[in-house]
Amino acid sequence: MSRIVDFSLQGNHLAILTLNDYKVYNFITGKTIKEDDFEFNYEGLPLNIEWRNKTDLLIGSTHGDVLVLRSAIPNNENGAQGVAQLFVDDMEDDDDDDDDHDDDDDDIDDDDGELGNKKRAKMAATQANGYNTNNNVDGDGDGDDVGNNQNEIDELLSKAEARQNNHHKRLREGNLKTNGKVHGFDGDNNNNNDDDDDDGNKLDDDFDDSILDNENYYRPVTEGYVNGYKKRRSGTPTYDQQQQKQHRVGFYEAASKIVPYSPGSTPFLNKGETVDRRYLAMNNVGYAWIVVNKELGTSNSITVSFFDRSLNSEYHFTVDQRFDLASLNHKCILLGDSSKGLVYYKSHNDAGSSDAWERVIPLVKDEYITSICVTNHPNFNTIVVGTNVGYLRFFNQFGVCLNIIKTNPVVALSAASTTSNIFMVNQNAANVYSYSIIDIDQDNKFIQHNGVIPIKDRANRQLIKGLFFNEYNDPCIVGGADNTLLILQAWREPGNARWVPLINCHNVITEYGSNENKKNWSCWPLGLVNDSLNCLILKNGQFPGFPLPLPVEIEIEIPTKLSHDEDSAEEEFLRSLTLGKLLNDTLTNRDEDDQDPGQEEEEDALMDKLNQYSLLFDKSLLKMFGEACKELKLNKAFSIAKLIKNDKALLAASKISERMEYLSLAAKIGQLREQLLIELDSD
């Protein structure tokens, strides 16, 4: 038998948990009444076992999952035997006598109280470890194995009552926390500390099983569960095993309900007696809002506006539906009604007939649309629709369904600015989210699949505040919990993508809390262009209102400073390094076969920008080098010099050292210059 992980006592039944299975013993009969194996959804290890009530068991894992095993005690067993109280406070030495098995049975029958129950516990625990009290000796007959294993069992049972009385402490040592009520658990069954047993004996008054009344102990957030699964046992299952499988329920997965989301959307604002209004979508291109009329028999109005009125003019139209999703680009607008599964497509220059279409998505029970997007390809648009059960549908710009795939529940979708890439956010579990990047042009190829995305759901905060691509088609996201703009770096390389913070919007807007006039200001992100965050400044609100304030640009500022006035040499170094890597990755992965003459000029402009990053990189390092020399931190200064990869910058660092009369440091920098020249010659 595997090593014992945990055990739990209830009346005359002992449940023992190992790494691979569990067993339930009856002290009166001395027999195993239940034995089975199990498996967790997320490959966690078993941590503890607890009685939920008189028949059901709970098994907790290191990942915070809980496996609920119903009818662990068969109905016939539960009804046939009375419940006996088990006391294991002080195991006495005379329990380890050398009587045979028959004598032990007689002793147990004669004992009506504490000693008899302790002996039953010993016998059952001995069987749990696979030993027989009659013949458990090794080949030479010396009985060493019996003594060693019996001592281990005695020690295990002697700790039972102490472990029960300190249940909360033991669970906290297992890194488990409590603050809620288990979803679907019957409180009457879980709070039975003071209830009588079947034979009139009281359960231990000090035993605290309030941990079972806690939902967030197992999973944070709100409702729901997913069914667990168990490994198939070898051989043909018996009828009893097939019946027992019907009573198994799995992990309580408190995954929060997905709220339909479009980038830039807001809840209903300026609610009135007759109309409500809200923004359906907002990005660098423009924004769309809906005015919902509350009077019966009236239509709703949708307005589409643009920040650059030279490309498109503002227009509005009426609809009968109450759309709550939208996606907007330079060519068209896509609208969606999440509950009805309705999708409506309309070109900006459409007169109202040929290009406009609508389609109803077939939904299963409790399914609804969670996000939609439309690509901005030069030749054609592709519409993508995701739902809360993970269906992802692709349509062309005329409404023809091109593909359907099944993923994890879709939280959000966004399309690249100039390519056919789609960025998708999925919900894997409670407060656990992942991302994927799909290239539609390559037959919906997954460039990145189920990568971790560092966003968290917090009360009274949006999960995602902004979701967009920059001008180089790098995915960006702003989480509602921390208001930090993250950009995905090296996403074109499988297994090498990583999220890099570019700016903490709240700190920059409020000047790190130093300006009292701006302490209530917030930022509403629209996009990332030319190393600046295009956004709206909200002075006393969480969402943009009507009319919309003018967008402003905030320069990228890597979060390294503690105050607004702190020197920014280190920040400039990290910013030039980060943005330079992003731009270099874009230039490296350009497809030369698809380039046109206009792209050559664009590439020259990008090379000039890359050189500017290089100059800022060297300048910031030299500034940091000089400050380290002034502070007499020569080792720090030399470590900074080793980051410089330009001979002119190294020469400048050497001159700074000589001017401050740090000749040894200047000599080391001279060696760095020689090594750099050798590397350049070899290249």
Image (cartoon, grey):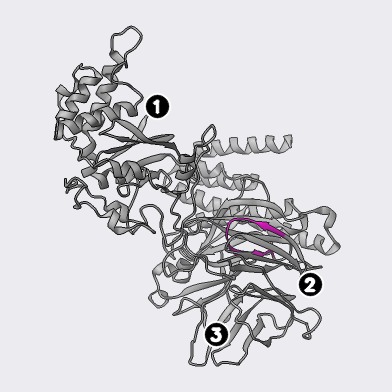
Question: Which stretch is magenta?
Answer: 404-416
Residue 246: percent from left, percent from top: 47, 48
Name the element at disc 3: strand
Mark toward the viewer: 1 or 2: 1
Of the two numbered discs 1 and 3 on the same chain, state the one appearing first in sequence.
1
Closest to the observer, 477 or 57: 57
The amino acid at mark 2 is: Phe
Q: Quadrant of residue 564?
A: bottom left
- Please give the name of the residue rendered at 77% of the width and 59% of the height, measured from the top-left corner: 604
Instruction: Rate crowding at label 3 as few (under 14), some (14 to 19) or many (20 or more) other CA atoms within 10 Å.
Output: many
Closest to the observer, 473 or 64: 64
- The image's mark for residue 1 is 1
Gap in angstroms between the C-alphas marked 2 and 3:
29 Å
Give the vertical position of 324 relative to 161 (above or below).
Answer: below
Name the element at disc 2: loop
Mark toward the viewer: 1 or 3: 1
Mark toward the viewer: 2 or 3: 2
- Please give the name of the residue rendered at 51% of the width and 48% of the height, measured from the top-left corner: 625
Closest to the observer, 377 or 450: 450
Inspect the magenta stretch and tell me whether residue 410 lies in it: yes
Gap in angstroms between the C-alphas marked 1 and 3:
66 Å
Query: How many discs mark residues in the rendered view?
Result: 3
Give the vertical position of 399 relative to 26 (above or below).
Answer: below
Q: Which quadrant is the N terminus positioned in?
A: top left
Residue 493: percent from left, percent from top: 67, 47
* Observer able to see residue 505: yes
Q: Contact (CB < 8 A) between labels 2 and 3?
A: no
Q: Which residue is mark 2?
A: 398
In terms of secondary structure, what is the magenta stretch mainly? strand
